[in-house]
Structures are given as structure tokens and as C-alpha cells.
């Protein structure tokens, strides 16, 4: 009997850790189950180990473990299991077994003949989970926008922060501290930063409706950005643009196939841009008001009740370490960065850096209560934590989440609370300790993270001491 062949695609919004952890977990599970697998990864460097048409043709099934768009249209007619990237890490055996047992629904793409429409449907009992699938689909579209937006925010934010090293007013030609290079850094960084909302909207729409959606989404994002609707306006513009194109594709599906090229290059952009303008223009004022109210509220909580804010942010970041709760706090911090608030992201970053450091420190201090393999993994978590890769703590938390997750959440909350109390400012949403030169209050930030990590490590170490026998 020939071995089953499976192809898979993994991807997370940041494209750094979850993407490759899910890929590795699927490969290990496939080997255990006697299945051949090829995994395509969608990281920040782009697509690696890309699946060919022949790979897909020969596959008995497909697994997509992703929180961003990985182009599932190409899997038309194949049994497909589509789940969040976290499930690829935690339950790879279950996913592969689903393909082996023939439990995966067959993926269908409407409008396949034109290659432009992007509405999928499947025929199986899994339709009973349509509500969860709908929520994941919305989350995936949003995270596709966030994934493409992040490099613009990181690059622009760090360059702006570097300009401040020459003096707070060093980019102002009228000020005595003016420095041409500082002005250059701030100008280029500001340009990168200004594209954040349009890029967010463009790639939300791209995830929904491909290239025609991206064009309309970019224009909608520009309208939101120029109109003051900010991050919230960009999200609304992205979804509106995507579904405007989906609607146009439906309305124009009976046009002759010979006009397909004309639709993509002329009809969709012209009508789509007109419609997104018609949709966004009357919405700009209320969205701007709502956006400003949300930002003002968060800023007020940040200054009046840092204890509560730090507790909430720390708990969210530590609860699922890269999952929806973590990303909700992270996206909020990124949105506030765009509004010039560098304090909120400082707490978010501290809370994201803390979990792997908790593991690393615990495996160092209480090393005899961890296996050699765990100690090796713990040592790697020093590097992961220092570079803001939270996911290194997941394998340890997964062994007993009921106990370990509260410990991680508690440590992360301490780090976030102290960061807010110290008034630290972090200008970039990623990079970990690599951005220390441009952090305002760098010493206090590192101290906050180390205190939260040490408290969490001691609690986790004492727990392991209680339940584990000393490793030989």
C-alpha cells in the first residue's frame, strides 16, 4: 500500500515563529504516522519551499494552518483542512489523521473558470462549525493586513526614533538643534509610517478579493488615513473594499470570458475606487470620532490606572502567546503607535518578551527539575525572548496549561505594569532588545521585563520542583 501524500501551508501574521513551529510540528507528526508531507511556509521573507502544481496534483489532501492568506484557491477539488496556525503547532497528528481518515471536506472555489472570484465552500459535516470558520476567516483577512503592514511600522518607527537621538527638535529647521541627517531620518521614517493604514487596508482587501481588492483597498486606506480615521478606518476600508470587489465579481460573472482581462485592469479598479470613495467619504467623520475616542480612552487608562492596564495587557499577551488575544493587544499597540503614543506598545512588548524569558530563567535556576531536552529548549528561549518571539514558551505551557498559563500571564502582567509605571516609550512594535538604543527609558524597560520574568520563573520552577523528579 503506497504512503499517503499531503501538502501543507503555514503562516502567521508576523511570519517569524508560529509559521515555522507549525511546519516543523506537521513534519514530525507526518513521520510518526508514515505520511509524506511537503510544507510551504509564508514567513516575513516570503514563501519558502513553495508547492508546485504537481505537488498539489499528487497530494491526497491539504492542511492549511495559517492566520493569513496563503491562496487556498489553488487547492480547488482537494480535501482540505483549514485551521488557525496554533492548531498546526498543538494538534498536528489530529490534522494529518483527518486527511488519512477521509474526514476533510473537498475545497470548492466558485468562479474557478475566471480565476478571479474567491468564495469557497465545502460539503461536509464541518459546515456545522461555520460560525467558528467565519470568525477565523475574518481574523485571517485582518492578520493578512497586519502581516504586510508590520515592516513599514517597524522600519519607519525605528528611523523616527533614531532621529530623536540627535535631539527632540533636531529635525526642525527652525530649531537651534537642527541636524540635516536627523531631518532625513524623520522624513524617510515618517513616509514609511504614513503608509501603514493604506497597506493594512490593501492587504485585508487582497486577502478577500485578490489584486482587484488590493487596489481598491489601498485607495480606501488612503482616504481613511488622510481623513483622520486612522487604524480603525483602515480596517473598515479594507473589508469594505474586499467585499465591494466580491460583489462586482458576482454581478459581472455572466460577462463573456473574453472580457476577463478588461474586468481586472479596467472595470474593477474604476468602479471599485468610485464605490470605496462613496462608502468611505460619509463614514470618515463618525469613524474619526470613534477612533479618537478609543485612543483617548486608552491613553487615559494608561495614565490614570497603569496597574489595571498592565494587568489586562499582560494577561492578554501571556494567555495565548501569539494567538487572537495576544494579537488584539499587539494590534492595539500598533494602532496607538500610528497616533504617536509610544507608551502602550512598551507594555505590550514587555509582556510579549516575558514568557520565553520565564521559561529560560526557570530552566536555568531549577535545571535539575527539567529534562536535558527541556534545558536545551530553555536556553534557546533566551534568544527568542530577547528578540520578541513569544512562541518559544508554547511547548512548555502546552504540557499543563491550567497551571503554566496563569504563571506566564502573571509574570507578563508584572512586566507590563512596571513598564507603564516607569513611563517607558518604545517606538517599534517588534525587535525586542534589538531596539534598545531607541527606547526611552531603556534601563527601566529591561528591569521591568527581568522582574516579571524572574517572578514567573520562580513560580514555574517551584511548580516543576513539586511535580517532577530530578532529571538524570
Image (cartoon, rainbow, N blue to C red):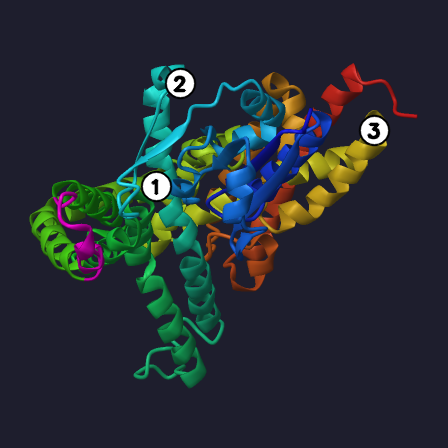
Q: Is residue 447 magenta?
A: no
Could you say which quadrant of the image residue 29 lies in?
A: top right
Residue 115 tag number: none
Residue beneath label 2, please? 126
**Residue 293 as seen in the image, left or right of residue 31:** left
- The secondary structure making up most of the magenta span is helix
Left or right: residue 341 compared with residue 228: right
Q: Earlier in the sequence, mark 2 or mark 3?
A: 2
Give the CA distance from mark 1 to mark 3.
40 Å
Question: Residue 272's spot in the image, x, y percent?
Answer: 15, 53
For label 1, the residue is: 141
Circle 2: is it few (<14), some (14-19), or many (20+) Cα within 10 Å?
A: few
SS type, badge 1: helix
Residue placed most toward the observer, 305 or 457? 457
Q: Classify 408 as above or below 234.
A: above
For marks 1 and 2, give the one nearer the viewer.
Answer: 2
**Residue at x-position 20% and y-position 48%:** 241
Tag 3: Cα neighbours inside 10 Å, few (<14), some, or many (≥20)? some
Q: Which residue is mark 3?
A: 371
What are the residue bounds of the magenta stretch?
A: 252-265
Mark 1: give few (<14), some (14-19) or many (20+) Cα within 10 Å: many
Determine the residue located farthest toward the right in the rendered image.
472
Amino acid at each position: 500500500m503506497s504512503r499517503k501524500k499531503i501538502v501543507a501551508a503555514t503562516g502567521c501574521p508576523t511570519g517569524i515563529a508560529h509559521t515555522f513551529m507549525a511546519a516543523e510540528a506537521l513534519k514530525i507528526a507526518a513521520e510518526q504516522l508514515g505520511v509524506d508531507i511537503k510544507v510551504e511556509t509564508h514567513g516575513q521573507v516570503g514563501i519558502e519551499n513553495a508547492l508546485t502544481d504537481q505537488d498539489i496534483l499528487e497530494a491526497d489532501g491539504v492542511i492549511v494552518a495559517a492566520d493569513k492568506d496563503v491562496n487556498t484557491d489553488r487547492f480547488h477539488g482537494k480535501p482540505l483542512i483549514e485551521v488557525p496556525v496554533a492548531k498546526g503547532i498543538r494538534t498536528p497528528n489530529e490534522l494529518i489523521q483527518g486527511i488519512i481518515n477521509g474526514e476533510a471536506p473537498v475545497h470548492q472555489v466558485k468562479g474557478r473558470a475566471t480565476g478571479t472570484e474567491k468564495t469557497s465552500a465545502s460539503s461536509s459535516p464541518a459546515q456545522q462549525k461555520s460560525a467558528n470558520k467565519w470568525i477565523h476567516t475574518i481574523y485571517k483577512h485582518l492578520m493578512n493586513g497586519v502581516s504586510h503592514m508590520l515592516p513599514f511600522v517597524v522600519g519607519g518607527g525605528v528611523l523616527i526614533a533614531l532621529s530623536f537621538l540627535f535631539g527632540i527638535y533636531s529635525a526642525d529647521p527652525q530649531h537651534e538643534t537642527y541636524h540635516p541627517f536627523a531631518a532625513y531620518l524623520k522624513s524617510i521614517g515618517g513616509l514609511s509610517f504614513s503608509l501603514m493604514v493604506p497597506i493594512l487596508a490593501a492587504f485585508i482587501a487582497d486577502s478577500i478579493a485578490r489584486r482587484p481588492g488590493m487596489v481598491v483597498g489601498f485607495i480606501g486606506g488612503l482616504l481613511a488615513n488622510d481623513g483622520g480615521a486612522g487604524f480603525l478606518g483602515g480596517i473598515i476600508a479594507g473589508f469594505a473594499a474586499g467585499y465591494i470587489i466580491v460583489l462586482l465579481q458576482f454581478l459581472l460573472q455572466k460577462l463573456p470570458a473574453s472580457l476577463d482581462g478588461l474586468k481586472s485592469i479596467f472595470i474593477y479598479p474604476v468602479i471599485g475606487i468610485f464605490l470605496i470613495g462613496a462608502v468611505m467619504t460619509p463614514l470618515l467623520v463618525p469613524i474619526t470620532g470613534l477612533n479618537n475616542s478609543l485612543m483617548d480612552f486608552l491613553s487615559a487608562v494608561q495614565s490614570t490606572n497603569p496597574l489595571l492596564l498592565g494587568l489586562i495587557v499582560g494577561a492578554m499577551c501571556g494567555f495565548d502567546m501569539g494567538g487572537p488575544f495576544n494579537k488584539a493587544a499587539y494590534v492595539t499597540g500598533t494602532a496607538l503607535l500610528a497616533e504617536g503614543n509610544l507608551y502602550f506598545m512598551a507594555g505590550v512588548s514587555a509582556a510579549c518578551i516575558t514568557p520565553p524569558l520565564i521559561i529560560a530563567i526557570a530552566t536555568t535556576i531549577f535545571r535539575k527539575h527539567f529534562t536535558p531536552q527541556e534545558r536545551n529548549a530553555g536556553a534557546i528561549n533566551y534568544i527568542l525572548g530577547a528578540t520578541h518571539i513569544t512562541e518559544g514558551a508554547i511547548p512548555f505551557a502546552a504540557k499543563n496549561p491550567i497551571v503554566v498559563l496563569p504563571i506566564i500571564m502573571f509574570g507578563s502582567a508584572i512586566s507590563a505594569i512596571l513598564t507603564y509605571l516607569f513611563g517607558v516609550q518604545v517606538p517599534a512594535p517588534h525587535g525586542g532588545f534589538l531596539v534598545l538604543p531607541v527606547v526611552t527609558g531603556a534601563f527601566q524597560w529591561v528591569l521591568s521585563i527581568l522582574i516579571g520574568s524572574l517572578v514567573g520563573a520562580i513560580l514555574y520552577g517551584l511548580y516543576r520542583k513539586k511535580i517532577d523528579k530530578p532529571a538524570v
